[in-house]
Image (cartoon, rainbow, N blue to C red):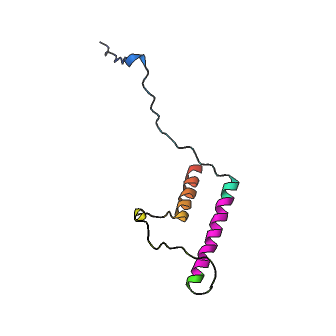
Amino acid sequence: SPAQKLVFNRVNGKRPPLLLQQISAPEECYTLAHEENVRFVYEAWQQVEQQLDGSRSGESACGPVQYVEKTPNPRLKNFVPIDLEEWWAQQFLAKIENCS
């Protein structure tokens, strides 16, 4: 005798929600203007860091001054700044992996 078929009735006549196998985030697209802005900020920051290093070693009397709070905010005790170079490296590698 043939096996009985299972029949699933809809609750209140509604269809069950569709499950997506993979939910992918929208791919980030960087425009040429965006990349130029990032490059400008990066290069400017590299110059500031070089000038700071030079003023610490006594090479220059004038230049950028590093601000240090006298009384640090206790809420920022566990703050960890982002390593922008590492982040960009990860973005670059992810972009390469997505293209291949």
Which picture quadrant has residue 26?
Answer: top right
**Camera-nearest residue between 33 and 58:** 58
**Camera-nearest residue between 83 and 68:** 68
**Residues drawn in magenta:** 36-53
Find the residue positioned furthest to the front.
71
Residue shown at 64%/52% (left/top)?
A: 30
Q: What kind of secondary structure does the magenta stretch mostly adopt?
A: helix
Above or below 24: residue 51: below
Residue shown at 63%/79% (left/top)?
A: 63
Residue 57 point in image, percent of width and height: 56, 85
Find the residue positioned furthest to the left.
1
Residue 38 point in image, percent of width and height: 64, 60
Residue 19 point in image, percent of width and height: 44, 32
**Quarter of the rendering occupied by the N terminus:** top left
Find the residue positioned furthest to the top.
1
Above or below 24: residue 12: above
Left or right: residue 7 compared with residue 99: left
Find the residue positioned furthest to the bottom.
58
Residue 58 point in image, percent of width and height: 58, 87
**Camera-nearest residue between 20 and 6:** 20
Above or below 64: residue 60: below
Above or below 37: residue 60: below
Residue shown at 64%/64% (left/top)?
A: 41
Q: Is 38 a magenta residue?
A: yes
Left or right: residue 88 compared with residue 34: left
